[in-house]
Image (cartoon, rainbow, N blue to C red):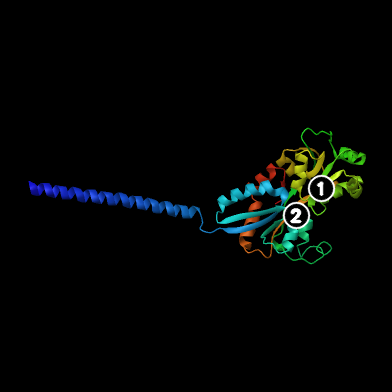
Amino acid sequence: MKKTTVLLTMLSLVCLFAGCNGKETVQNESRAEQKAEALREEPEEQTELIVFAAASMTETLEEIAKVYSEKVPEVKIVYNFDSSGTLKTQIEEGADCDIFISASGKQMNQLDISADKEINTEGLDFIDPKTRMDILENKVTLAVPEGNPRNINSYEDMVQGLKDKTILLAMGNEDVPVGQYTQKIFEYFGLDEQELSDAGVITYGSNVKEVTTQVKEGAVDCGIIYSTDAYSAGLKVVDTSTEEMCGRVIYPAAVLKASKVPGEAEAFLDYLSSEECKTIFEKVGFTCIN
């Protein structure tokens, strides 16, 4: 009986020990699987893709970056938003950049060796012409602050108010695309910008977001901005410019010749023409070209 009892006790201990080892093995395998899954979901190293883009694209491109990161987690989009003129200067001065998206063809042409020499007067050769494409079209609009205190309802009202010196208008600087479109509108209506500036009825912004902010805060009576910026800021648009007034507002994009990741850059440009991106762009008022 004693021998039988001892034998049964030993067998119980062996089984208990084996059971513990088996449980621990299962736990270890589970942890290993979890680690492997985490590695699959989160790449050890991401490739940075640096995109210089017009300030008017801030909201849409930030939304697109979130979607793209889910589709291509190994690529991290890094944006630099500002006026196209400022971005062009930064590129010219050697800033790291893989893709340039301008709010006007002028700044892109100034960096494109294949462009008209009357525009690219310095013979700058920064972008890859083979990758260049027009991706979006925007509209130049006249927006007013909440309540529209000066009751401005059209460009004609703006013109009369400027002539009478009874309103204050916000516009972009001359090196900013939205400012250049505004200058064309002035020419269309026969307004003298210098005269208006001297009279103190114009304020300026270094990019379209600064102009938009002045309108949003009620610091001015009206401002000339893009329809997409008016939408994003929740501003009321009282008039929209025609092509005759200031031309078409086309956004070209291209990969830079100095890009360290040209393959990733071209892939992202292609993605910007996808149906998924089209929905995001058109939601705020852009018109997709490709």
Q: Residue furthest left?
A: 1
Identify residue type, mark 1: Tyr
Q: Are marks 2 and 1 in contact (CB under 8 Å)?
A: no
Vertically, is 54 above or below 201? below
Visible in this render: residue 140?
A: no
- According to the picture, the residue beneath numbered tag 1 turns out to be 204
x and y percentages locating residue 120 in the rendered image: 80, 63
Q: Residue at x 92, y 39 (%)?
A: 164
Q: Residue at x 65, y 52 (%)?
A: 272
Between residues 215 and 19, which one lies in front from this camera angle?
A: 215
Q: Is residue 182 left or right of residue 58?
A: right
Vertically, is 161 above or below 20? above
Question: Which structural element holds mark 1?
Answer: strand
Between residues 155 and 243, which one lies in front from this camera angle?
A: 155
Question: Which structural element holds mark 2?
Answer: helix
Single out the mark in the foreground, 2 or 1.
1
x and y percentages locating residue 38 in the rendered image: 46, 52
Residue density around tag 1, few if under 14, some if 14–19, many if 20 or more, within 10 Å: some
Visible in this render: residue 93?
A: yes
Numbered circle sitting on residue 238:
none
Q: Residue at x 59, y 55 (%)?
A: 76
Q: Quadrant of residue 228?
A: top right
Q: Could you tell me how many numbered marks the image carries? A: 2
Label 2 or label 1, whichever comes before in sequence order: 2
Residue density around tag 2, few if under 14, some if 14–19, many if 20 or more, within 10 Å: many
- According to the picture, the residue beneath numbered tag 2 turns out to be 84
x and y percentages locating residue 287 in the rendered image: 72, 46
Q: Is residue 115 left or right of residue 272?
A: right
Question: Distance of mark 2 from mark 1, alpha carbons?
Answer: 16 Å
x and y percentages locating residue 126 in the rendered image: 72, 64
Identify residue type, mark 2: Ser
